[in-house]
Amino acid sequence: MNNGCVCCTVRGDLIRVVEGLMRRPGRFDGIIVETTGLADPVPVAQTFFMDDDVRAKTELDAVVALVDAKHLPLRLKDSREAEDQIAFADVVVINKTDLVSPEELAVIEDVVRAINPTARVYKTSRSGVDLARVLDQGAFNLERALENDPHFLDHDHEDHVCGPDCDHDHHHHAHDHHHHGHDHDHDHDHDHHHHDHDHHHHHHGEMSPIHDVTVKSISLRGGEMNPERFFPWIQKITQTDGPSILRLKGIIAFKGDEERYVVQGVHMIVEGDHQRPWKDGEKRESRLVFIGRDLDFDKIEKSFRACEAQAA
């Protein structure tokens, strides 16, 4: 791994392998990168959007975390990376469900959802999940995720955890999207706290039933934003708190802007663009989710509110 700040670290070895594969005739439908059980997922994911050559030839499809339902509590005690892998994932597969009781499985589900409220979650044994629900998801692309699931960032709805044979609609949909890069975090476990907050539909972590957890999710909801305040704010908060921010994603309504603005980031890297026009009757509100460690909810919530546009 290249030396340097974690926020800017990429995998030089992965870059060389991907570039070598891209030179082969015939190419591929996709590339699955399977990390070791306790690998940090961030440098692997960052490789696909920080290296210009890799980014030009590939697109990160989804980060998938495989959770061992039996040993999750133990892994959370001895591995910070285990927690990070769930927090960073777009899709979480809870495996070995046959080795725990229904009560224990319910705790594991709560822990996963507390760490990462936006991930699509499947329960299975012997990794018996349909690959069509894991591969070719386009889940890392927030714009595509929102196209396929308009409630992707709505945590007020009851969360749905899918079984291996689930084929109906739910709040955390898989997302159709062609892909070339696929980051797969393998056999990890985690836990986290996540509290519901009544501050204008803002939420921050609620205590997890497993206490060896440091990752927190913060969900913010507000009205239309003033772009002259919001952009300096998001840049400042990601520069000052970037090392603690694993993922951020959101939909922003700017005053006077007829299109929804989608923003997402990893550590200090933030990207954003207009997604689509606001629909007739659609509530123009801003939603932003932070997943990270040692995040100051009150500071983030207060400064987020300060970006709101003043009523005319």
Image: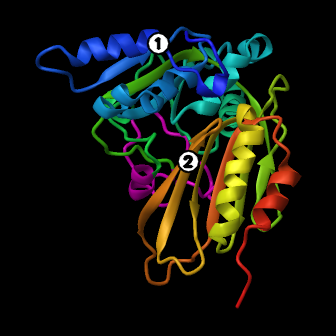
In the image, is 106 to the left or to the right of 203? left
Q: Residue at x 37, y 32 (%)?
A: 55
Residue furthest left as drawn: 26
Q: In which quarter of the image is residue 146?
A: bottom left
Q: Is residue 25 positioned above or below 306 on the image?
A: above
Q: In which quarter of the image is the C terminus?
A: bottom right
Q: What element carries label 1?
A: helix
Q: Which of 282 and 132 is in front in this view?
A: 282
Tell me where residue 33 sits by quadrant: top left
Q: Residue at x 72, y 72 (%)?
A: 308
What kind of element bears circle 2?
Answer: strand
Instruction: Tell me the residue that label 1 is attached to.
Output: 12
Q: Is residue 39 left or right of residue 290?
A: left
Whole-angstrom CA distance, mark 2 to mark 1, is: 24 Å
Inspect the magenta stretch and tell me whether residue 173 lies in it: no
The amino acid on which the numbered mark 1 sits, given as a three-letter code, is Gly
- Magenta region: which residues? 143-171
Q: According to the image, label 2 marks what residue? A: 264
Q: Callout 1: few (<14), some (14-19), or many (20+) C-alpha neighbours within 10 Å? A: some
The residue shown at (47%, 51%) is: 170
